[in-house]
Image: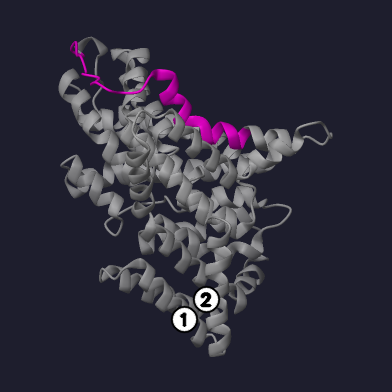
């Protein structure tokens, strides 16, 4: 009976989102309604909502805020644009897809998906016009890279939220995510576009020159600020993970904390950037404003998650699936993918699924891999109820059929390969 009530709640959530009701409002309403229908006392429902919001945001709100500041500073300083030109110059005209893919990965780490897409799409069109290559041939590697980083790599909202809910180590999650991201991005972003489009002879690529523009930061500075959070978190994780005691280990323990790593990155970026402190502070403010609704959606998702935990639905799912002989990681992917297809939003699907799959974490499902499995499931089969679907369709002026054959297929490939990668990693950990 509890699962029937849960499915009714998910259906209600789907209908509310379909009616264009804000996902945060929809999640909160469904969370409270589901708790009451499951027989929880009103006081317990309110307590679960408060606890869910607090426990979810408490461990990640500063990570999200500092990450948003970093992204906006990198965008406004011109570092992202500088990275693009350097990579295109390094890879050359014949390997332009690889340059765009790597650019998307580097820019996508500090920037959220929508921001990264808006920053890079003018460059994609400029390269297409200058070389004579299809916009999709250039644009799919960019979109793939941004999707991969959005699904698998902190400090993006989805992975950070899941790491907090599952009590996963963000540094380890980032390392495992990088292991998955690179090959998946190459397959879905390089070889998939070449498979579905007519073969383009490199000799047909016209000579082209992209104007770099004036006032951009230097190469070393641009790469440093873009990758600094990643390097700090990875270095801290590796250094603090050593079993031996050595001088300075406390420093690595400090750096392994994503809040500390991002705070240091923001401070160093402020010191290195050419703009005035006043303008930099405006960038920081705008960056946080841009993710305010994302933070609220995550908070509401945390409330829904806590309702599912306190009502015992998660344990019910665990008991019912205990005899299925399925990997908990596969089961988590299936549940999240189903919610993604139903609800549209990757973030909403991920945080909604978390409360259902949390009890599945154990020896055969480490929390870091559970983050990546749910993240992979949240990218599955994007279609007409996903804003990313329409953004890609409109920017590239595609028909619905063409969008399904390019964007939806690419997202699904990333999702399935992500699951395969997680299952393989689980065999070696």
Looking at the image, which residue is at 64% across and 54% down?
A: 327
Question: What residue does disc 1 label?
Answer: 32
* Colour scheme in use: one colour
Q: Are marks 2 and 1 in contact (CB under 8 Å)?
A: yes
Seen as rendered, the residue at the extreme right is: 244
Tell me the quarter of the picture where residue 283 sits.
top left
Q: Residues within 10 Å of mark 1 (few under 14, many from 20)?
A: many
Tag 2's secondary structure?
Answer: helix
Could you say which is closer to the camera, residue 192 or residue 108? Answer: 108
Could you say which is closer to the camera, residue 381 or residue 323? Answer: 381
Q: Position of residue 248 (x, y in %)?
A: 76, 32
The C terminus sits in image quarter: top right
Looking at the image, which residue is at 37% across and 51% down?
A: 381
Q: Position of residue 141 (x, y in %)?
A: 34, 31
Could you say which is closer to the camera, residue 341 or residue 196? Answer: 341
Question: What residue does disc 2 label?
Answer: 49
The N terminus sits in image quarter: bottom right
In the rendered structure, the answer to whether residue 39 lies left or right of residue 247 reads: left
The magenta segment: 205-234
In the rendered structure, the answer to whether residue 312 lies left or right of residue 293 reads: right
Q: Sequence-wise, which precedes: disc 2 or disc 1?
A: 1
Q: Position of residue 95 (x, y in %)?
A: 34, 16
Q: Position of residue 138 (x, y in %)?
A: 27, 28
Q: Is 219 one of the magenta-colored residues?
A: yes
Could you say which is closer to the camera, residue 323 or residue 227? Answer: 227
Can residue 415 be seen by looking at this rendering?
no
Looking at the image, which residue is at 31% across and 56% down?
A: 386
Q: Residues within 10 Å of mark 2 (few under 14, many from 20)?
A: many
Give the answer, above or below, for where 72 lies relative to 365.
Answer: above
Q: Nearer the viewer, mark 2 or mark 1?
A: 2
Looking at the image, which residue is at 25% across and 35% down?
A: 121
Give the answer, above or below, for where 324 lies relative to 288.
Answer: below
């Amino acid at each position: 009976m509890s699962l029937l009530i849960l499915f009714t709640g998910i259906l209600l959530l789907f209908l509310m989102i379909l009616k264009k009701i804000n996902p945060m409002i929809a999640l909160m309403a469904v969370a409270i309604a589901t708790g009451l229908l499951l027989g929880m006392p009103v006081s317990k429902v309110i307590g679960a909502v408060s606890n869910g919001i607090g426990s979810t945001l408490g461990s990640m709100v500063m990570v999200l805020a500092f990450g948003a500041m970093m992204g906006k500073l990198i965008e406004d300083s011109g570092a992202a644009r500088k990275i693009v030109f350097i990579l295109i110059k390094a890879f050359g005209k014949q390997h332009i897809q690889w340059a765009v893919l790597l650019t998307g990965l580097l820019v996508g780490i500090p920037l959220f998906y929508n921001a990264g897409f808006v920053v890079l799409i003018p460059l994609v069109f400029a390269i297409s016009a200058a070389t004579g290559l299809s916009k999709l041939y250039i644009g799919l590697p960019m979109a793939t890279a941004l999707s991969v980083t959005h699904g698998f790599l902190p400090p993006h909202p989805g992975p950070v939220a899941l790491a907090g809910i599952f009590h996963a180590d963000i540094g380890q999650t980032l390392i495992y995510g990088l292991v998955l991201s690179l090959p998946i991005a190459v397959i879905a972003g390089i070889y998939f576009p070449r498979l579905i489009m007519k073969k383009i002879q490199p000799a047909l690529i016209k000579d082209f020159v992209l104007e770099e523009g004036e006032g951009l930061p230097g190469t070393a500075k641009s790469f440093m600020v873009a990758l600094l959070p990643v390097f700090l978190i990875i270095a801290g994780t590796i250094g603090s993970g050593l079993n031996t005691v050595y001088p300075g280990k406390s420093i690595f323990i400090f750096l392994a904390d994503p809040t500390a790593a991002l705070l240091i990155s923001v401070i160093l970026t402020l010191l290195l950037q050419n703009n005035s402190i006043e303008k930099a502070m405006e960038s920081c403010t705008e960056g946080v404003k841009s993710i305010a609704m994302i933070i609220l959606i995550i908070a509401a998702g945390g409330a829904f998650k806590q309702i599912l935990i306190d009502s015992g639905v998660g344990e019910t799912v665990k008991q019912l699936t205990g005899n299925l002989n399925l990997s908990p990681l596969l089961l988590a992917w299936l549940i999240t993918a189903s919610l993604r297809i139903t609800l549209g939003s990757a973030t909403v699907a991920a945080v909604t699924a978390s409360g259902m799959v949390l009890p599945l974490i154990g020896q055969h499902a480490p929390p870091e891999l559970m983050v990546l499995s749910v993240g992979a499931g949240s990218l599955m089969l994007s279609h007409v109820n996903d804003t990313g679907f329409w953004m890609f369709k409109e920017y590239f002026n595609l028909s619905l059929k063409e969008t399904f054959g390019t964007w939806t297929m690419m997202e699904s490939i990333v999702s399935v390969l992500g699951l395969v990668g997680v299952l393989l990693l689980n065999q070696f950990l």
